[in-house]
Image: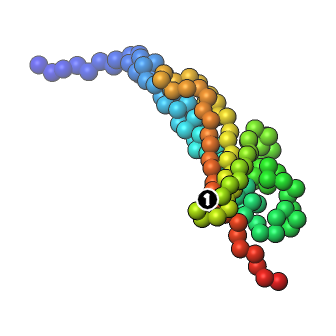
Amino acid sequence: MTRVHRPRRGLAAVETALVLPFLAFMFVIAVDFCRVFYFSQVVTTAVRNGALYVSDPDGPTMSRYPDLTTAARADADASFASQLSVSSTSGTDVGGNYTRVTVTFPFSSITRYPGIPQTLTLTRTALVRPAPAIPK
């Protein structure tokens, strides 16, 4: 006795209907992960720029930026550079004088995930000591 192979109509449509929501959810998760990574890189670059501005021994007189906030936001995209919050504190410890530069950015995800907050605050901090002055 031989088996007769009959085409199973509609099976592909049922499989697609079952798998498509999962694939869409995975796509949105990947997009949000990429967005978090991108904005964390922007915040890291901003704190680095701020640290370089603060560490200059000649001070702001030789810089092309008028203040720390402008220097930190210089490389950020203009559409969200204003959302970068830049602050600094100065102090003295065993190693001498220092300045702590902190940059924060309020990140909002595209969708809500169970157990994960929709908004995150991305924060980077750099502890900077003044660079030694170069003799002229």
Q: In this rendering, does residue 72 appear at all?
A: yes
Q: Secondary structure at mark 1?
A: strand
Determine the residue located farthest toward the bottom in the rendered image. 136
Q: Quadrant of residue 2?
A: top left
- Mark 1: few/some/many CA within 10 Å (<14, 14-19, 20+): few
Apparent side of residue 82 relative to residue 91 in the rendered image (left or right): right
Q: Label 1 is placed on what type of residue?
A: Asp
Residue 48: image x %, image y %?
67, 57
| Residue lying at 68% horizontally and 45% vertically, measured from the top left | 103
Q: Position of residue 23 (x, y in %)?
A: 48, 28
The residue where tag 1 is placed is 93
Q: Is residue 36 left or right of residue 1?
A: right
Q: Is residue 112 left or right of residue 134?
A: left
Q: Is residue 83 above or below residue 117?
A: below
Instruction: Identify the residue at image location x=58%, y=35%.
Output: 32
Q: Position of residue 123 (x, y in %)?
A: 62, 43
